[in-house]
């Protein structure tokens, strides 16, 4: 399977900036055989979808967040169904910023995984431990619970991506060591296999940059990245894609 590199733009890039990003990207000579995914803001989604289509780029895209119903009385929420109709392929679910800032529970995350799958969107489920949990030796306990509850009752035959993002490495410039990444990815892979999953990819996220991408991507069990800050500039993202 090709390595997958995903850009999590978070609350950055307006529709105009999104268009400008892809215009610049279309002029780069990107030399790598990767699956590429971008998660723009909901407001920039249409601009992103149009740019990808008009410039014939090999990007797929998805929403960073959505509600668990396609439509109805849910003021302020996004519809995954509308995103799907606009051309979305992916759904980012369980990002640590939403778990901590918006208090999303594993139960809600599980509903989102099921809702995405019911629409034919591929879930990218984010999991990861906090610093105290890592220091207290509870990493595997925490991510086991996130996997167990997040993937509850979804059936084994689904394709999905797991993004392992240690919370202490997100946006901090502190990247997990190759040993930590490899050990945790191996553990996740075993967990998924033991439960009959196949066709999944395990991505690493947390301060991935042009200068550490090559080493991380060469590790066993690392099938790609979820990149935040370094995905905002085409030049940086290009280097990561080509790593
Ligand atoms: P970062 O963010 O690359 O800026 O650390 C990663 C993420 O939050 O997905």
Image (cartoon, rainbow, N blue to C red):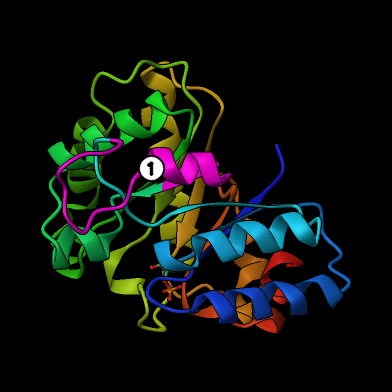
Residue found 49% across the figure and 68% down from its top: 44
Left-right relation of 188 to 240: left
Instruction: Tell me the crowding category of disc 1: few under 14, some 14 to 19, or many 20 or more residues within 10 angstroms, Cα based.
Output: many
Which of these two is toward me, 107 or 22? 22
Specify the quarter for ligand 1.
bottom left
Report if residue 55 is visible in the image. Answer: yes
State whether residue 112 is above or below residue 15: above
Question: Could you say where residue 179 lies in the image, as x and y percent from the top left?
Answer: 46, 60
Disc 1 is placed on an element classified as helix
The residue under label 1 is 80
Which quadrant is the N terminus positioned in?
Answer: top right
Left-right relation of 14 to 27: left
Report if residue 232 is visible in the image. Answer: no
State whether residue 50 is above or below residue 91: below
Question: Could you say where residue 171 lies in the image, as x and y percent from the top left?
Answer: 37, 79
Left-right relation of 84 to 28: left
State whether residue 211 is above or below residue 112: below
Question: Could you say where residue 178 lies in the image, as x and y percent from the top left?
Answer: 50, 64
Which of these two is toward me, 123 or 126? 123
Q: How many marks?
A: 1
Which residues, given as a range, are shown in magenta? 70-91
Residue found 67% across the figure and 80% down from its top: 20
Residue 78 sits inside the magenta stretch: yes
Residue found 81% across the figure and 55% down from its top: 56
Residue 65 sits inside the magenta stretch: no
Spot the residue most to the front. 73
Image quarter of residue 6? bottom right
State whether residue 219 is above or below residue 211: above
Which of these two is toward me, 198 or 97? 97
Question: Could you say where residue 39 lies in the image, as x and y percent from the top left?
Answer: 49, 60
Which quadrant is the C terminus positioned in?
Answer: bottom right
């Amino acid at each position: 399977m090709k390595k997958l590199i995903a850009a999590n733009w978070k609350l950055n890039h307006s529709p105009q900036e999104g268009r400008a990003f892809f215009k610049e990207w279309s002029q780069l000579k990107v030399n790598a055989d990767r699956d590429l995914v971008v998660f723009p803001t909901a407001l920039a989604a249409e601009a992103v979808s149009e740019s990808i289509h008009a410039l014939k780029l090999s990007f797929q895209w998805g929403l960073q967040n959505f509600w668990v119903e396609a439509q109805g009385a849910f003021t302020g929420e996004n519809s995954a169904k509308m995103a799907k109709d606009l051309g979305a392929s992916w759904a980012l679910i369980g990002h640590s910023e939403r778990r901590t800032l918006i208090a999303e529970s594993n139960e809600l995350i599980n509903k989102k995984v099921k809702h995405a799958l019911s629409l034919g969107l591929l879930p990218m489920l984010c999991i990861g431990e906090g610093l105290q949990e890592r220091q207290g030796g509870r990493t595997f306990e925490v991510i086991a619970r996130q996997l167990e509850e997040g993937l509850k009752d979804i059936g084994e035959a689904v394709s999905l991506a797991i993004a392992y993002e240690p919370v202490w490495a997100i946006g901090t410039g502190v990247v997990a060591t190759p040993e930590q990444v490899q050990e945790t990815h191996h553990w996740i892979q075993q967990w998924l296999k033991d439960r009959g999953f196949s066709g999944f990819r395990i991505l690493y996220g947390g301060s991935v940059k042009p200068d550490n991408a090559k080493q991380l991507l060469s590790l066993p069990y690392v099938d790609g990245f979820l990149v935040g800050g370094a995905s905002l500039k085409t030049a940086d993202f290009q280097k990561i894609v080509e790593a």
